[in-house]
Image (cartoon, helix red, strand yellow):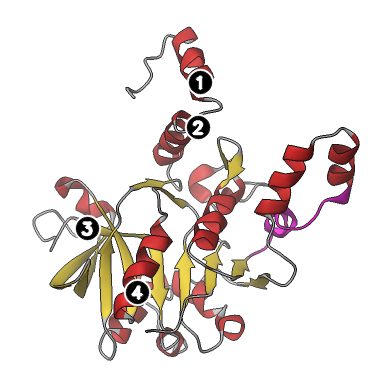
Amino acid sequence: MPDPIRTAVFPVAGLGTRFLPATKAVPKEMLPVVDRPLIQYAVDEAREAGIEHFVFVTGRNKQVIEDHFDRQFELETTLRERGKDEELRRLDLDRPAPGEASFTRQQIPAGLGHAVWCAREIVGRQPFAVILPDMLMQSSPGCLSQMAAAYNELGGNFISLSECEPDKTNQYGIVELGAAKGAAFEITGMVEKPTPADAPSNLYINGRYIFQPELFDHLSTHETGAGGEIQLTDAIRRLSESQPVYGLRFGGHTFDCGSKAGFLAANVAFALDRPDIAADFREELKKAGIQSPAG
């Protein structure tokens, strides 16, 4: 059986330019879907999959992410005095235990590959996951749990995949699939934003990965790719020359919350999935003359 995945890396240093001016002072990872910030959903997904160590690669003006996962004594004292025991319980559940969270800084915006490389000393020589928090997953079990189950069968490296409309392949990183391996497939190639006519499939990389530590060796060269940045996909290609890289079709829905449309759709979908507010939410839509989705 392969070594278990106990550590997850969260690259959260991005500037969130697609959401300006909302992200001028608030990190995009702290934007709320219903009543939880995006980064909390990502940590919850990781914890469900058995992750024990949460590594955040931050940048300037991202201190609020660290504060979110810390204790706030004034708030807790006020809640305790007012008998808000359920709110206190939820805060305790959301917060990593002492020593479970680590924070490191990506000093320059040099790409996703560089952000992952910045976590190398904290991760060490063990397999690890990478989660992009602005890609929000809706499923049970969670996306990383599905990947971990397949990883435990095969080992190696894993990329989670979602399906897009065939005419939208030019918006995503698309993979070429080889032989089936149980619930997974070998990945034989990756193409960034191909035209529909040139796309090898309609399966795109949706922001969840499991890697062996040798990935860091292919990032340490600091070889730049598209946009003059250190690209994670380039390192995966080099890694695949010596190790298997598998793709797993995600059994759920992916919301690209880095886009305005995806973020708004996620809020609607997650609100309608909440038993405590779904009925009230539908009623508010009705009052506004908006037809709510069926279901």
Q: CA distance from mark 3 to mark 1?
A: 33 Å
Q: Determine crowd level at label 4: few under 14, some 14-19, many 20+ residues with C-alpha closer than 10 A.
A: many
Upstream in the sequence, badge 4 or badge 3?
Answer: 4
| Residue 85 sits in quarter | top right
Question: Badge 2 local density, few (<14 within 10 Å), some, or many (20+)?
Answer: few
Q: Which residues are magenta?
A: 59-73
Which one is in front in this view, the residue at disc 3 or the one at disc 1?
1
Q: As rendered, which of 209 and 14 lies closer to the eye?
A: 209
Of labels 3 and 1, earlier in sequence is 3
Residue annotated with mark 1: 281
Q: Which residue is mark 2?
A: 274
- SS at mark 1 in the image: helix
With 210 as the anchor, is 250 left or right in this view? left
Separation of residues labelled 4 and 3 (CA atoms): 19 Å
Residue depicted at 85% across the width and 34% down the height: 83
Q: Earlier in the sequence, mark 2 or mark 3?
A: 3
Q: Which residue is mark 3?
A: 203
The amino acid pointed to by label 1 is Phe
- Amino acid of disc 4: Tyr
- Along the polypeptide, which appears first: circle 1 or circle 4? 4
Quarter holding the N terminus?
Answer: bottom left
Which amino acid is tagged 2?
Arg
Which amino acid, mark 3?
Answer: Leu
Label 1 vs label 2: CA separation? 10 Å
Q: Disc 4 or 2, which lies upstream in sequence?
A: 4
| Label 1 close to label 4 by CB (< 8 Å) | no
Can you identify the residue that label 4 sits on?
151
- Circles 3 and 1, Cβ within 8 Å, touching? The answer is no
